[in-house]
Each structure stands twice: as C-alpha cells, then as structure tokens.
Amino acid sequence: MISIDRDDPSRGDVHQLLSEHLADMFATSPAESVHALDPSALSAPSITFWTARDDGGLLGCGALKLLDSPSGSPVHGEIKSMRTTASARGRGVATLMLRHILDDARTRNLERLYLETCTEDYFAPARRLYARNGFTECPPFAGYSLDPNSVFMELPL
C-alpha cells in the first residue's frame, strides 16, 4: 500500500532521487532554465516536502512552496520537485502525490497553485498529468521570467 508522508529531503534515498532529478534537469535544459531545488532548499520553512513509499521503499516525492503575498498570509503555492523513481513510473504515484499536494493546499485555504515545468519532450508526461488535473498554462509568476524552455501552469482552488 502506498503511503504519502512528510519527509526529510536530505534522507539518503530521497537525496539520491533529488540528485537524479537535478541531473536530468541539467541534461535536458539550459542551466539558466533549471528551477529545480536541491535538498537544502527543499528544507526551507516555506516548503512542505513529502515522499510516497510502499513498504518503506521510496516511490517518489513532491513539495508545496508557499508563496509570499502582500497581506503576509500565503494565498498561493507552487508545486516543486515532483519526481517518481524509474521503477515506480506508470503506477499512478505522481497522480497520488499531486492529489495529496492539492488536498493539502485546499486544507490551507490557498486560492491558487502554480508550477513551472519544461517544454522539452522529456517533460510531456508531466505536462499531461497537470493538464488532466485541471492546470492550464499561465504567464510567469513569483519572479519567474518568460523563458522558451519553461511552461507555467496554474490551478484555481
């Protein structure tokens, strides 16, 4: 049975998965277009980080970053570091993680979620996942700039 729980991004197996994630980002995108976070950045107080596991084995991870708002109380969030292990692909882990993040965002009464992903074919499955779950393309947000290598998406909650 797959469980999703808060976790430490510096935990050994998680660190390895995030390292693979960053390596893939730099292998498929120009360095200036890589917006993935390393484990230390994912430990920031504004970020909640989860892993999906089956009988203790790591299947994937995802995070929710609270974005600053003028009122001081976050009303928007950004999905970060969605990644599944190679052996878990095709098992619905990414969908479970995404739904978990959406549920958490709704519990926090966030009004909107954003994400940035890449335009390369390698990221087409991720873009399809987000579109199937109601995300639509939007302009850059939270300090991002227009970038031909990035796709920005949003979901009103």
Image: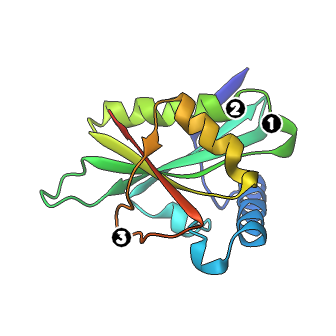
Disc 1 to disc 2: CB gap under 8 Å? yes
Circle 1 Cα neighbour tier, 10 Å, few/some/many (<14 / 14–19 / ≥20): few
Circle 2 Cα neighbour tier, 10 Å, few/some/many (<14 / 14–19 / ≥20): many
Q: Nearer the viewer, mark 1 or mark 3?
A: 3
The residue wearing badge 2 is: 93
Q: Secondary structure at mark 1?
A: loop
Disc 2 to disc 3: CB gap under 8 Å? no
Identify the disc placed on residue 6. Answer: none
Q: Is residue 111 left or right of residue 81?
A: left
Q: Secondary structure at mark 2?
A: helix
Locate residue 92, reporting x and y percent: 71, 27
Q: Which image quarter: residue 20? A: bottom right
Instruction: Quote the CA–CA distance across marks 1 and 2.
Output: 7 Å
Q: Secondary structure at mark 3?
A: loop
| Residue that appears at 35% across and 61% down | 141
In depth, the one of 81 and 123 nearer the eye is 123
The residue wearing badge 1 is: 89
In depth, the one of 139 and 26 nearer the eye is 139
Identify the disc placed on residue 143. Answer: 3
Locate residue 75, reporting x and y percent: 24, 47
Q: Which amino acid type corresponds to the residue marked 1 in the rendered image?
A: Arg
In depth, the one of 27 and 82 nearer the eye is 27
Q: Which amino acid type corresponds to the residue marked 2 in the rendered image?
A: Val
Q: Which image quarter: residue 10? A: bottom right
Q: Which image quarter: residue 127? A: top right
Disc 1 to disc 3: CB gap under 8 Å? no
